[in-house]
Every structure is written in C-alpha cells, then in structure tokens.
Amino acid sequence: MAIGLVVSLATVITVNASADPPDPRASDLRVLAYEALKSDPAQTHYARGQTFRTRSIEQDDNGDRHIRMDRYYRGLPVIGGDLVLHMSKGGGLKSTSQTLTEAPDLGTDPALSVEEAWKRAFRHTPVRERAQGGAVTKPQAAAGPGKDAARAARAGSRLVVWAGKKKPRLAYENVIRGVRADGTPAQVHTYVEAENGKVLGTRDRYLHEQGTGNTLYSGQVELETTPGEQGGFELRDDSRGGLTTLDAKNGCVQGDPLCETGAGGGSGSDQSQGPNNAFEEGEFFEEEEFFEEEEFFEEEEFFEEEAVFFGLGPLPAVRGKASKSYCLEGVPVCYGSGQQVRQFEGAPPPGEGDGQVPPPGEGDDGGEGSPPPGGGDDQGGGDADNPLGIPGATSIVSEDNSFGTGDASDRDTVAADIHYGASQASDYFQEKFGRNGFGGDGRGPTVYAHYGDGVTNAFADPVTFSAVFGDGDGQNVQPLTELDVVAHEMAHLVTLSNNALSGPGEATALNESTSDIFGAMAEFFTNNPEDPPDFVLGEGLEGDSQEKLLTRFMDQPSKDGRSPDCFSSDVGQLEPHDAGGVSNHFFFLLANGSGESEFGNSPTCDNSQVKGIGRDAAEQIWFRAVTTYFTSDTGFQNARKGSLQAAADLFGQNSSEAQTVAKAWDAVNVK
C-alpha cells in the first residue's frame, strides 16, 4: 500500500552535499526525472525547447516515486501539458499520467493583438466590461447566459500554449474579474487562439460550493484554540499547522466588485487597466542545451504570474539568484513550484516585486527567508495573518474559551462550525491517508467566516491557501458552515495543491465531485450524531423548501432535476457541480453497490448489478487516483484508467476491488 508522503519541493527537498558521492548529479532527482523524460519521448512527449518544474513527489513503500511536473515550451506554460512521471526506485520510467497527445512544436509570436484578444474574451463570458470611468459598457453578444451579464474588469493577460483535445496552439489567457448579476463573484479565464482569435475554452476559476449548514448541525463540539496576545483565546489551531478562523466582518477582498458596490463591504480597488498587471517581472536560467542560440530569451524577457484574486494559479516562482540554486545547467527540470513565463510583444512592462522563494534547505521550518503561510503580499494582497487582505478581518476571540451560542445570529457560532469542520477534515486526511495537512506540507489554512453580504456560496483558494464562507441570504439559504461543506472546500486545497483537475469541462466536474466525495467521507469519519453522515450534500441548507436547488444526491444524482446519473459526451458542457453527478454516482456504487441500501436506492445505467466494496476501500482508491494519477485535464475516461490503476496498486490487478471499480464505471456508462 502506498504511504501518504507528499512533499513540497520548494521548501522540503534538499541536496545532500555532505555525502559527496562520486557523481552528485547521479542521485539528483532533477537529473533522474530528466533522464526519465528523455528515455521515452514518445510516451512523455519530451522534445527540444521544453522545461519542467516539479510540483511534488509521492513515494510508495517499495521506493517507487510519482513526480508531478508542470511543462513549459520556450518559456510559456503549457495549459494541459502537466504530467506525472511514475518511476521505479532506481529511477527508471514505468509509465506516465497526462492528457497531452503530442509535443508542442509551434511559433511563439502572436498574430492577434492583445486588444483584439480582450474583445474576443468578453464576447464569450457571462460578464461585461466596466469602462474606464466606472460605467458598465453595453452588453455584447456572449456565449454565456446573457441574463448573468454584470460588471467586470481586466485582471491580466499572458501568452500560453493551449494543449486541449487537439494540437497544441499559441493562445492568450485573458483573466476577467467581476461579479455576476446574482451577486456571485466570477474570475473567468478565457483562452483565445493567438493566430485567428478563436476562443478555445473558458473556465471560471472560482471554486465554490452552494452548500449547507449552521451550528444546529454540529451541536456542542471541542475546539482547539490558542491564547490570544491581548488575552482570551483565539480560533487558531497550532496542532493542525496554524489553522486559523477569522471574521471577515462581511467584507471582501479588495478588487472584488462585491466590495465596490457596497454589497460586500470594504473599499475595493481597480487593478484592471493594464493587460498585464496580474504578472510581474522575474528571472530565468540558461538552458543552452535545449535552446538554439536564436531561440534563447534573455532573463529580462521572463516574468512570473502574480496570484490573482481567488485564482488557481501557481505558487511563487523561483526568482533571481534562488533560481540558480533550483536548476542544474543543461537539465530543464527544476525544484519548486511556479511559472516560467515569457512576456509577449507589445505588452507594457510588468511591475517590480520581490517574493523570492528560498533555495532548498533555507527557511524550511518557516523561519527567516521562508514564504509566509498563505502566501504574503505576492499572494492576493494580504499577509500571513490575513492572506486574502480582507479589510477589517479580525481574529475571533473569546474571554472564556467558549465560542457561539448555538444560534446563527451569534457571529461566533458560525465561526465555530467552520473551525470545527476544517479541523475534522484535516484529521480525516491525516488519519485515513497519512497526509500532513491539506497541501501535504503541514500548513493549516486560513478560513473566513461571514464573507460578504448575502453570499450564498463558499470559496476555496489554493494560491493563498484559504477559504471563505458566506452567511446565506438570510431567507431561503442558511450559513454555509455544515461540516460536509467545509470539508468540501478543504478537499479543493488537497486536489489543487498539485494542480490536479484544474482544467475546464470534465476535469472541473471531477474536481467538484472529488470534493463532494471527500466532504461526505469526512462526515462519516467525524460521525457527529447532530449531523448524521450520509451521501447527500447540502441536505439542510434550504430547510423545508419543496424545491431543493442546492442539494446533491450521490445515490441518484438526477433526483435534483439537473445532474446526470450517466455519462454522455456532453457532460463536460454542464455546470460543473451538476456534471460531477456522474463520478458521485460511480463512487456511491463502488462503496455501497446498486439497488437498496441504508443510504439510498442507486440504479445503474446499464441495468447491471454492482456489489460495493465499502467506504474504506473506495476512498483509498479515489485518493490515490487523484493524488497519483490525475492531472490538470483528466476527464472521465482517464479517471477510469487512473482509478483502475490505483485499485491495482492497493489491492492487486485481479482483486475484487479492481474488478468492482471497472463494474462501477461501466454502470455509469464510462467504458
């Protein structure tokens, strides 16, 4: 069985120089990974002009390693080009997990102008652009639902290589930040082909849960707290990596249009006028072996992506002298996370910034030189104590170490639910999978109660390692603080810490489903009698309302009137929470089987009968599949492949568990 060892190479992996082996490079993981990439280019799609940045390593009991990497082509991030190298203990390549079908081979000079790319982007989003003076422009014909058109602004633009389902192409990634007409924030990433202006894809990179909960669900619980500097006790849990719950005071992040309109409090700021202000200048390292002289770009032509509001972008890039420590000459594989991005022609110069990440071995214990938990100023405008920079957000302090009254009208009651749910989710991943914190590096997230005014969502942001929870609308939707909702958001931090399932379409559906699955399983793990575990998400949010718009049923997803029970070719076009019904249904069948059970009556799409393997085995298989075999753009067919391999790893190729995985996928038409 694989052990749950996942490490962040930016702060943990060090090179042991004291051993002084005959050839230090021979045991360096950068070299081993590079040799594995070169050993079978037909499988890895390695070719000249590429560089790679290593996100994490998972190591099995037998010494096999699974190295997760981001791919860059001539300095441009390859969207959908990430991969996992599955390597033997000795460093040999066993297999790869990826969705890329061929190595990028294209020019990097765009024919389309930046401004034209912006025009195309706004035509294909459900928000419209705010003019320079603050007025909203006339609605444009949009591919998205026109009824949702609302205020929006430009957050940033960059050149990328789009590696979707077809041949890799040069594209602009334009980020539009705004708010929909219903008050829901939006940050839409639109990919516009840089040759002809065709829109290749869009994705809203907010991960939100329309969930459930208030303190009536959890009742009286124990909370881990910390003595406050000014007396009393704060909702900070140092036993779980500094997990901290703050009161957002119904404010929101500066730049969030909810703040600008007054609906969410706070002052807000407009950072949208330059097409590149979401990115800042950085440095790069020479790769003379892999770039022809005329292809090589000077250091000043490279810049890193600064985290944008609620983005799912990378962790800080390696900067300046630190980049030299991460990389070996002639080896296009580096330690640490982050982008290596080339500025495109005609763009205004990006701003200056620091944000340097220490080289391996420096600042590993969170001391001087290490980036603060949650990111700091380069990660959303906040600091270690308030990573999202929400104006007015404060610690939650109690003089007698008792928080809340059991009534949602008491602000501390909702905060106690969130703190409890996040701590239980942390224990779940630790005890079930050996994962040290949601990101695998021991850090605890910062979570915010009372975000915005009338917000009926919760959001997870892996860039700042934080999450926010709205209070509901005060009428039909209660505060979004039930345990399975909080665990759902924490599961996003697990999935996205390695960039798994961050792509659009089917990948996003699987991402939301994964959070549903682990949200439900964390509820079983906790087994709180005030909130009995089940396979229903959002069961109490809308009270006695006849129309349950926010509830999801894993036994038969179609009971909500929207979600499919069975896979079809258009599932990726559906709203992601609805589309995730396919894999929710798969997991229910895998754990409980088809037909009647204590948790529901689950049909199959092919009239087959499935005998479940139990929750424990099912969750182990899904966790290993997500963390070991799923990449950014994994769809349902590759999810089947990855979960079958995970079952074989854990229980054997011909085990009943592996056979049931195949039967459960068959039963939802993923064949």
Image: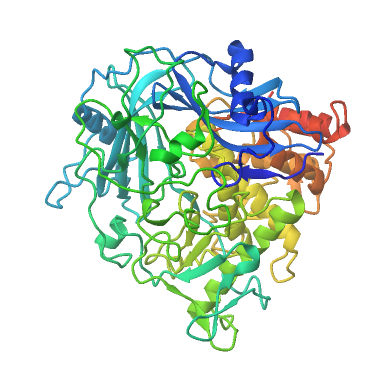
> From this viewpoint, which residue is outermost toward the right?
655
Query: On the rendered image, what quadrant is the N terminus found in?
Result: top right
* Along the line of sight, the residue nearer the viewer: 384 or 544: 384
Using the rendered view, name the quadrant where residue 551 is placed.
bottom right
Q: Is residue 57 visible?
A: yes
- Quadrant location, the C terminus: top right
Q: Residue at x 41, y 24 (%)?
A: 286
Q: Is residue 250 found left or right of 102 in the rendered image?
A: left
How many numbered marks, from 0 up? 0
In the displayed structure, would residue 154 be above or below residue 53? below
The residue shown at (26%, 36%) is 122
Direction from residue 55 to residue 384 in the image, left or right: left
Q: Position of residue 157 (x, y in %)?
A: 29, 35
Above or below residue 232? Residue 206 is above
Q: Nearer the viewer, residue 390 or 437?
A: 437
- Image coordinates of residue 334 in percent, x first then y, are 52, 32
- Residue drawn at 49 percent across, 33 percent down: 505
Residue 427 spot, x, y in % from top left: 70, 60
